[in-house]
């Protein structure tokens, strides 16, 4: 395992071992999928390519003194993501799906959570 220099992390992209994905098709969300690939297939007519339509939420996970991973206000992030999606007429991710994806990707990438 590569050792991360926590005191000197650069600002920018840091590859992790896994990510979680979900496809929205026929007016419904599919099942969560775990992937180790940094790449996604995207349709040539995707609005994100042509109109820059996207919604983004950053989230902080940290290790407590007791060894438990904690999240900073994840419920508020989920609500903001829904609000952002509604505002730009995208399908919003239900809070429970947001939670499931979040907890799954954190468990899969525990070694990337900063130590206490």
Image (tube, grey):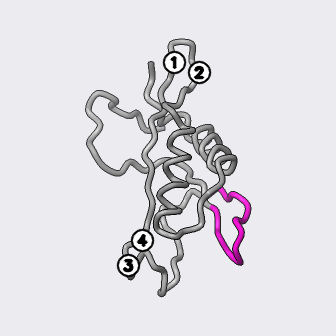
Q: Earlier in the sequence, mark 1 or mark 4?
A: 4
> Quick one: SS at disc 3?
loop
Residue 47 drawn above or below residue 87: below
Decide: is 72 above or below 27. Answer: above
**Residue under the point 63% across and 48% down:** 101
Label 3, on which residue? 51
Residue found at x 48% / y 47%: 16
Circle 4/circle 2 CB separation < 8 Å: no
Mark number, residue 64? 1
Span of residues in magenta: 22-34
Q: Quadrant of the C terminus?
A: top left
Q: Is 25 part of what is drawn in magenta?
A: yes
Disc number placed over residue 53 in the picture, else none: 4
At x 56%, y 53%, the residue is 19
The alpha-carbon separation of the residues under discs 3 and 1 comes to 41 Å
Distance Cα–Cα, label 3 vs label 4:
5 Å
Find the residue positioned furthest to the bottom: 45
Please tell me how crowded label 1 is: few (under 14), some (14-19), or many (20+) other residues with Cα within 10 Å: few
**Mark 1 and 2 residues: CB-CB less than 8 Å, in contact?**
yes
């Amino acid at each position: 395992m590569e050792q991360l220099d926590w005191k000197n992390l650069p600002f920018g992209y840091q590859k992790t071992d896994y990510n979680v994905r979900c496809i929205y098709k026929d007016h419904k969300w599919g099942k969560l999928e775990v992937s180790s690939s940094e790449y996604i297939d995207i349709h040539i007519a995707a609005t994100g390519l042509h109109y820059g339509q996207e919604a983004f939420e950053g989230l902080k996970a940290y290790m407590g003194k007791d060894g438990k991973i904690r999240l900073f206000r994840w419920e508020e992030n989920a609500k903001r993501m829904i609000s952002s999606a509604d505002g730009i007429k995208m399908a919003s991710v239900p809070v429970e799906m947001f939670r499931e994806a979040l907890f799954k990707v954190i468990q899969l990438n525990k070694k990337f959570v900063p130590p206490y």
